Image (cartoon, coloured by chain):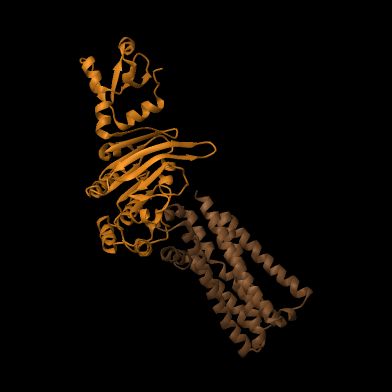
Chain colours: A brown, B orange
């Protein structure tokens, strides 16, 4: 599995166009995030933008694998199809971890530097962000395994736009305060739900991948 | 271990094609050439051996391990080169080595670097800047550096010039010098198989028509050019297939030595693997 993870990391960061897109995204988001200091943008950054970054690992590796038809060669390695899929999910979780780390740095600046939100509010939003990251990762990965690079990317963009739209609609209809004031139990429940959905997503992807190569 | 591959009644069905009850054994220390026209089922057979597709079989033993339950053990000792599946062109040979060192327990980095040097492959250049021949050589370097016992090549040399193909054949000869090594090679370039194969397995329309040693093929098969009168006097059992030409017949004889005893004054050409394949595919059968 280590070899597959290493390959996917290479696909993401050692290929110029893929690495450049990460650098560009981080610089762009960093500038926006650190120049705009409102609660609305804070929730948007932690609840949507960071989770979307977390789901990006699979996009580059799927593109590179399809271009070289690498999956066929990969199956001849001493790894099972299940291990190949799990390796991709482990890397995805690594990306979620990294994007949430980035979000944490952003949170510290917003809480203690600009006093946009209080520490309890920041913790709640971070919790929501983690659960959305897990759910987003789950949905996107099944999409890529099922649809491949081209339609998987369209699906990715659609889900990202849908998530943004739902956020906009929610904040318009119910207000941001409901996010910032909700009970910790609700947040833990969301994270737990995220873990369950991720597990189901991994099982579904294993099934899809195994069926594709059988 | 006497056999690298032992397969009995391997079947894979698709909507419009069935690979039908293939049984064959590949002894260690030998090279088996798999021949057949496009769509005959050669790649399906290879993919079945690799579990890229799920086939049904009564027995599937590779390198002494059971194909159903010991797939990972088999794949530690197996190397495969395809014509349609490669390493990403953005990789460098050095990265391919690093990746494979995390995948194979027996990875031998020194051997890999030696192969790169021997084949004249720059370690840090991306594969997209390599010629087709260099890419195939890299795949051989990668395939041979985890000490595999079985090498499977699926049209791996197609698209290469004769010089590179000759170098590849040298590598294969070197590989099979070890008694416990074996090669299964599917190729359209039957002249390569003439140079290297110990066994020939011929698949036609999903069915295994024969598995014979190369020497058997050379001794058994021959091509006779004859007129109508001689053709009519031939024993039907000796005719594998024939082609009717404007004023004569070209006949693939399948019992050449026996035939020569009866028709000692008739000249018979040796049949190459390509001749045999073409007669079976395009020739007419005696009813």
Q: Position of residue A191 (x, y in %)?
A: 62, 74
- Please name whichever residue, B158 or B267, is drawn nearer the observer in this view of the structure: B267
Residue under the point 74% across and 79% down: A178
Q: Quadrant of residue B115?
A: bottom left
Q: Can residue B267 be seen here?
A: no
Quadrant including the C terminus of chain B: top left
Side of B211 where A32 appears, left or right: right
Q: Quick check: A109 above or below A199?
A: below
Q: Quick check: B170 above or below B287?
A: below
Residue under the point 32% across and 13% down: B231
Residue under the point 29% across and 39% down: B192
Q: Can residue A105 be seen here?
A: yes
- Outermost top residue: B229
Q: Position of residue B2 (x, y in %)?
A: 27, 45
Q: Quadrant of residue A44?
A: bottom right
- Please name whichever residue, A115 or B177, is drawn nearer the observer in this view of the structure: B177
Q: Quick check: B178 above or below A188?
A: above
Q: Position of residue B95 (x, y in %)?
A: 37, 64
Side of A164 where B60 appears, left or right: left
Q: Quick check: A15 above or below A117?
A: above
């Amino acid at each position: 599995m280590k070899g597959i993870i290493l390959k996917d990391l290479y696909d993401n960061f050692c290929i110029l166009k893929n690495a450049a897109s990460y650098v560009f995204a981080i610089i762009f988001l960093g500038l926006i995030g650190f120049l705009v200091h409102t609660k609305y943008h804070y929730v948007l950054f932690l609840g949507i933008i960071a989770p979307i970054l977390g789901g990006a690992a699979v996009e580059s590796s799927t593109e590179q694998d399809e271009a070289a038809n690498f999956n066929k060669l990969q199956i001849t390695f001493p790894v099972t199809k299940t291990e190949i899929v799990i390796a991709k999910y482990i890397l995805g979780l690594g990306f979620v971890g990294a994007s949430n780390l980035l979000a944490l740095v952003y949170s510290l600046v917003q809480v203690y530097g600009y006093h946009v939100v209080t520490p309890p509010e920041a913790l709640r939003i971070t919790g929501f962000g983690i659960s959305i990251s897990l759910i987003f990762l789950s949905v996107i990965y099944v999409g890529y395994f099922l649809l491949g690079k081209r339609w998987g990317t369209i699906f990715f963009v659609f889900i990202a736009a849908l998530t943004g739209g739902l956020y906009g609609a929610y904040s318009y209809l119910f207000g941001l305060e409901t996010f910032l004031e909700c009970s910790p139990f609700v947040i833990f429940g969301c994270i737990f739900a995220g873990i369950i959905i991720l597990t189901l997503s991994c099982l579904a992807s294993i099934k899809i991948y195994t069926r594709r190569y059988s | 271990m006497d056999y690298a591959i032992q397969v009995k009644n391997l079947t894979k069905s698709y909507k419009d094609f069935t690979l039908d009850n293939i049984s064959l054994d590949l002894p260690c220390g030998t090279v088996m050439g798999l021949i057949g026209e496009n769509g005959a089922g050669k790649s399906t057979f290879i993919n079945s051996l690799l579990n890229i597709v799920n086939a049904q079989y009564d027995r599937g033993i590779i390198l002494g391990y059971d194909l159903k339950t010991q797939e990972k053990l088999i794949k530690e000792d197996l190397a495969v080169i395809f014509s349609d599946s490669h390493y990403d062109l953005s990789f460098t040979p050095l990265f391919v080595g690093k990746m494979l060192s995390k995948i194979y327990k027996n990875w031998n980095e020194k051997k890999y670097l030696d192969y790169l040097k021997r084949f004249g492959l720059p370690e840090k250049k991306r594969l997209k800047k390599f010629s087709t021949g260099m890419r195939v050589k890299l795949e051989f370097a990668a395939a041979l550096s985890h000490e595999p016992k079985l090498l499977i090549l699926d049209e791996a040399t197609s698209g290469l010039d004769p010089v590179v193909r000759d170098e590849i054949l040298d590598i294969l000869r070197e590989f099979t010098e070890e008694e416990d090594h074996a090669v299964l090679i599917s190729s359209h370039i039957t002249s390569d198989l003439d140079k290297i194969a110990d066994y020939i397995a011929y698949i036609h329309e999903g069915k295994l028509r024969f598995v014979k040693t190369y020497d058997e093929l050379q001794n058994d098969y021959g091509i006779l050019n004859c007129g109508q009168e001689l053709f009519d006097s031939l024993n039907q059992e000796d005719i594998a297939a024939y082609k009717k030409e404007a004023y004569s017949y070209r006949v693939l004889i399948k019992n050449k030595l026996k035939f020569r005893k009866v028709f000692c004054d008739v000249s018979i050409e040796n049949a190459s693997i390509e001749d045999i394949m073409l007669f079976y595919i395009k020739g007419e059968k005696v009813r």
